[in-house]
Amino acid sequence: MTRRYALALLVAAIGAPIARSFAAPPPAVLTATERDAALKYLKEMRDLLLGHVAGLSAAQWTFKPAPEVWSAAEILEHVTVVEEAQIKVITSAASRLPALPADDRPQVKDQVIEMVTTNRETRRFQTPEVFKPTGRWNDPKALVEAFGIQRAALIDYTTTTTDDLRSVAWENPLVGLSDGYQWILFVAAHGERHTKQLVELKAHPRFPRS
Amino acid sequence: MQALSSSTTLSEQDRHAAATLLDESRSALHTAAAGLTDAQWRFRPEPAVWSPGDIVEHLVKSEQAVYQLITMDLVKRPVLPPNRRSRVRDLAIVMAVTNRDVRFTAAEMVRPTSAWTSGPAMIAEFDRLRARTKDYLAKTMDDLRGRTADHPVLGVIDAYQWILFVAAHSERHSKQMVEVRARG
């Protein structure tokens, strides 16, 4: 074997393990199981929320038990603006963020996203200023439609995307480092959290009967 | 080549936060178990639903298992470099584990097997093991942030977070016990 060939082999032999630990794995798309699970969650939570706002009267939309407690309209506005913002972040993540080597990817299990985010008992949070409701939609019908459009966009993206969502990750304020797929689950769970809040509101003794 | 990781001990803040959770969850268990008669200790609302006694047996086994995992396994492993440590938030551990809207089947090794005779004796055993966990937390110089293990429900978390888990876990089951009592 020539010296040059032996040197090339030596470099390849040393280089290979280094390449494995520092380079990202080859791109992958979501598995059918992952896609189905996320879609099921997104659709079920969409239906749950829409079901709870269906048929609310004007009085019921705007009822606030106390000044600092959100009305149904404020809850849905908040959910909608968060959806709007997160869709942009999620659908651009694979092209904006570096693909992470396997060792740098989040190791939290997917189910933790829902477990953490839908827990309203242990801890409440102040949402960032930019996501606070401001009465952006005057008409409840327009608000419900706006939510529907955002959720449909995320469902569509989840259904069709070939982005390698497991390869990109960014910090979630509740969970910690979460990958692109987990962020989709977070959007669904965030809606679920606020649906629980809405259910609680509707159970308030002074919630208008009609 | 990566630099060898230096070992660090727990911050006072971390020690205090976990100790508070260990205390609070122990109190919650005592409150949930207060005044139960022997019949109530053994009462299963349905065959597959745990009695208060089953719950405490599960907590005893879990407390033991986590302590052993940390002190006999994890702290013997090499300390991880900073970029290989847990990226899950401490608060997330507590929020996830105390959320009873999502249910799980317990791992085999911590499942109750009715290997107990008296509820109060089991509570006493839990207290003994919980005190041992607390004592370890207070005194250890081991690097608990520098070692991680794969939790079957949560994923990879560090040894300190395993302590948060065991506290939140007993809190979770105390709530369950309150519900079971109400059905009895």
Image (cartoon, helix red, strand yellow):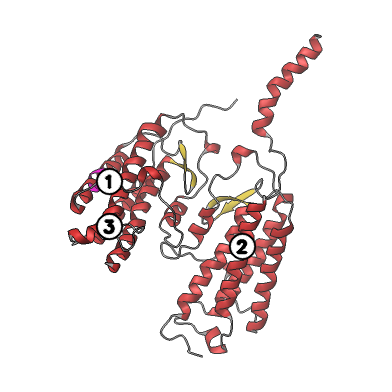
Q: Quadrant of the N terminus of chain A?
A: top right
A91 sits left or right of B128 in the view: right
User: Is disc 1 on the same chain as disc 3?
Assistant: yes
Tell me the CA gap for discs 3 and 1. Answer: 18 Å
Residue A141 appears in the picture as rendered: yes
For mark 3, does the 10 Å Cα neighbourhood hold few (<14), some (14 to 19), or many (20 or more) residues?
many
Label 2: element kind: helix
Name the amino acid, label 3. Pro
**Is residue B39 or residue B153 the one in the foreground?**
B39
The answer to whether marks 3 and 2 mark residues whose Cβ atoms lie closer than 8 Å is no
- State which region is magenta: B126-130
Name the amino acid, label 1. Arg
A133 sits left or right of A5 in the view: left
Disc ID at residue B130: 1
Residue at screen point 70% across, 24% down: A15
For mark 1, does the 10 Å Cα neighbourhood hold few (<14), some (14 to 19), or many (20 or more) residues?
many
Residue at screen point 51% across, 77% down: A70
A99 sits left or right of B177 in the view: right
Residue that label 3 marks:
B52
In the image, is residue A135 part of the stretch drawn in magenta?
Answer: no
User: Is disc 1 on the same chain as disc 2?
Assistant: no
Residue B8, percent from left and from top? 42, 34
Residue B174, placed above or below residue B59 = below
Which residue is the extreme one toward the front? B47
**Is residue A148 or residue A94 the one in the foreground?**
A148
Tell me the CA gap for discs 2 and 1. Answer: 40 Å
Residue that label 2 marks:
A40
A98 sits left or right of A45 in the view: right
For mark 2, does the 10 Å Cα neighbourhood hold few (<14), some (14 to 19), or many (20 or more) residues?
some
